[in-house]
Amino acid sequence: MPDPISVARSYTPAAGYHFLTPCYDFGVAVTTRERVWRDRLVHHMALAEGEVILDIGSGTGNLALAIARHSPGVRYLGIDPDEAATRIAQTKTAQIVPLPEFRVGFFGASAIDDWLSPAKIALCLVLHQVGLDEKARLLREAWQVLAPGGKLYVADYGEQRSRLMRLLFRLTIQQLDGVQDTQPNADGLLPVLMREAGFRDVRELETFRTPTGAIAIIEASKPRI
C-alpha cells in the first residue's frame, strides 16, 4: 500500500486544536446543524450498493456513518491527516459492513492509486481551513482520481449572502481558522475553483443557515471523455 502524502505537513485538527479532538463531534453537531446537512448530502449523492466513494478529510467518520444509515453496501475510503480523529472514526464505524477503510495522510492522487477510481468524492468542511493554493490543489487532485462521469460533492462554508450569515461567520469560523483561508469561501469562490480544476455542471444544491454561517452543498461532474 502506498504511503499517503507525508503527515509532517501542518494541518488544522478536527476541532481546531489537538486537545479538543475528542469534543469535535459534539461541537460540530451544535454549531453546524451537521445531522441535517450530512443526511441531505448523502441524499444528493444517491449512492448505489457496491459504489466506490472517497471521503477527503474524513475526520471522525461522520460521513461514513451517514452513508451506512441511508446507503448500505457502499465501498468507502476516507483519508485525513489527523491520526487521533482517524482512530475515533475507526472505532465508530467498526460494525459497518462492508467495513470502511481509513488512511492517515494528506490527500493526493498517489495516496489512493491502489484503489478503484471512485464514482463519487466528498469534501466536507475541509476547503475553508486551507489556503487558496491548497484549495485549488485538492480540487485538481480530486478531478484526477475521480472516475470519468463521476461526481464531486463539496459540503462547506460557501458564499455568505446575508448580513447575519456574514456576521456569524466572522465571529466564529474566521476567529478560529483565520480570515485569509476562509474569506475565499465567504466570497463565493468555491464554484469558480471547481470549474478551474476541470469540473463541469457545477451547481449549488442546497444552503443551510447555521450558527456559524451558511454551509452549502455544491455538486460538480467530471466529463466522461
Image: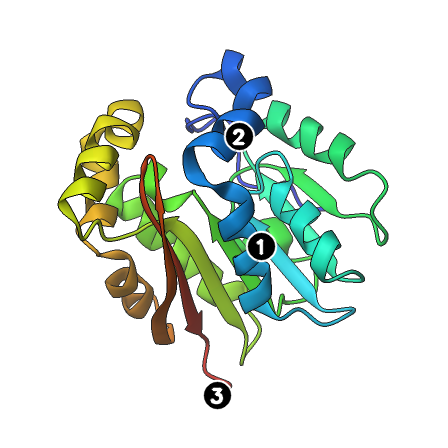
Q: Quadrant of residue 47?
A: bottom right
Q: Nearer the viewer, residue 93 or 133?
A: 93
Above/below status of 162 relative to 24: below
- Circle 1: element type: helix
- Circle 2: element type: loop
Is 138 on the left-hand or right-hand side of 177? right
Is 106 on the left-hand or right-hand side of 201? right
Q: Residues within 10 Å of mark 2 (few under 14, many from 20)?
A: some
Q: Which mark is residue 39?
A: 1
Amino acid of disc 3? Ile
**Which numbered disc flags the more N-terminal residue, 1 or 3?**
1
**Could you tell me which residue is drawn at 51 percent across and 42 percent down?**
34
Percent position of residue 194, x then y: 33, 64
Q: Where is mark 3, residue-wise?
A: 225
Percent position of residue 27, x then y: 49, 26
Q: CA distance from mark 1 to mark 2?
A: 30 Å
Q: Residues within 10 Å of mark 1 (few under 14, many from 20)?
A: some
Q: CA distance from mark 3 to mark 2?
A: 34 Å
Amino acid of disc 2? Val
Q: Where is mark 2, residue-wise?
A: 7
**Which numbered disc flags the more N-terminal residue, 1 or 2?**
2
Tag 1–tag 2 contact (CB < 8 Å): no
**Could you tell me which residue is drawn at 43 percent across and 43 percent down?**
125
Q: CA distance from mark 1 to mark 3?
A: 31 Å
**Could you tell me which residue is drawn at 47 percent across and 31 percent down?**
30
Q: Nearer the viewer, residue 11 or 93?
A: 93
